Image (cartoon, rainbow, N blue to C red):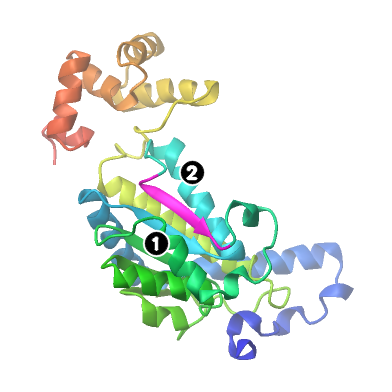
Amino acid sequence: MTENLSTESRNQNTMNLDTMSLHELLALMNHEDQTVPLAIQKSLPAIKKAVECVVSSFQAGGRLIYIGAGTSGRLGVLDASECLPTFSVSTRMVKGIIAGGEKALTTAIEGAEDNEKLGGEDLQRQAISKLDTVIGIAASGRTPYVIGGLNYARSQGAKTISLACNTHAEISHDADVAIEIETGPEVLTGSTRLKAGTAQKLVLNMISTAAMVQIGKVYGNLMVDLQPSNKKLIERSKRIIMQATGCAFETAQHQFEDAHHNVKAAIVMILLNCSYENAIDQLHEAKGFIRKTLKEE
């Protein structure tokens, strides 16, 4: 029953929310939000296992698939969509699926999250296999759509991960790795787009970013595999080349053009004083890790 879920309980600190001054209300929300990272800290071992699953899938040519409904589904779609410009991955490699389809990103789709069969059908259309990792996201931890998706993924041999904001969550039973972030009662009772949503966003940030680091998409703390698809990102690309190599702007700009806007290749060209073709070969041999092209550990 939902009344037994901490995310559905009334927050005793906010019982008089409608009588507070605006400053008091905002200060209280800020205070409540500060509890989220501490709640996540307790789940770092499970999050680490989740990242290892995702990395294993990527290295085998598999995918990371998020599945959820409502706010949870939107956050999965958001994280997946941001991986494309940040890490130059394909829309196939990281994908978000939301109950009710694309329309559900902006409009609530009546009954979609309650349809367990639909979760499996949506994943079936993605041709899920044992190479993939599927992450089911549900603040309550009991969304039928997500349960159906995780069950189908397991039946296909995929690695499964659950992300809930309640302990002893139902979806935890359907996952190889269960992440349970106890965020507690919301400031506004039952509004899990607040602390629970924040927790989910932070955890998804950790999983996707850490996995990309592990497969060579980062050098130092620089996003060297970004996709320079607009003026802002083109200028950022040049700054990244300068920061990674210590070169002047003119050199970064020249090598960026010679590398056909491939930031990672431009960096290797400068650091190894080599041609574009040689840089590409070196990166291929190093499985995409810039540091390994420098023979550094």
Image quarter (top left, top right, bottom left or bottom right) of the N terminus: bottom right
The one nearer the camera, 158 or 9, is 158
Q: Amino acid type of disc 1? A: Gln
In the picture, which quadrant includes the C terminus? top left
Left or right position of 39 against 90: right
Q: Is residue 30 left or right of residue 93?
A: right
What secondary structure is marked by label 1? helix
Q: Is 97 contained in the magenta span?
A: yes
**Which residue has dot 1 on it?**
124
Q: Please, what is the dominant secondary structure of the magenta stretch? A: strand
Find the magenta span and give its range.
Answer: 92-99
Mark 2 lies on residue:
82
Label 2: few (<14), some (14–19) or many (≥20) C-alpha neighbours in 10 Å: some
Please report the residue visible at 76 percent of the width from the left and 63 percent of the height from the top.
26
Horizontally, residue 53 falls left or right of residue 13, namely left
In-front residue for pair 238/58: 58
- Residue at 50% x, 66% y: name it: 37
The answer to which image quadrant residue 257 occupies is: top left
Type of amino acid at the residue the image marks with label 2? Glu
Residue 149 tag number: none
Q: Is residue 12 visible?
A: yes
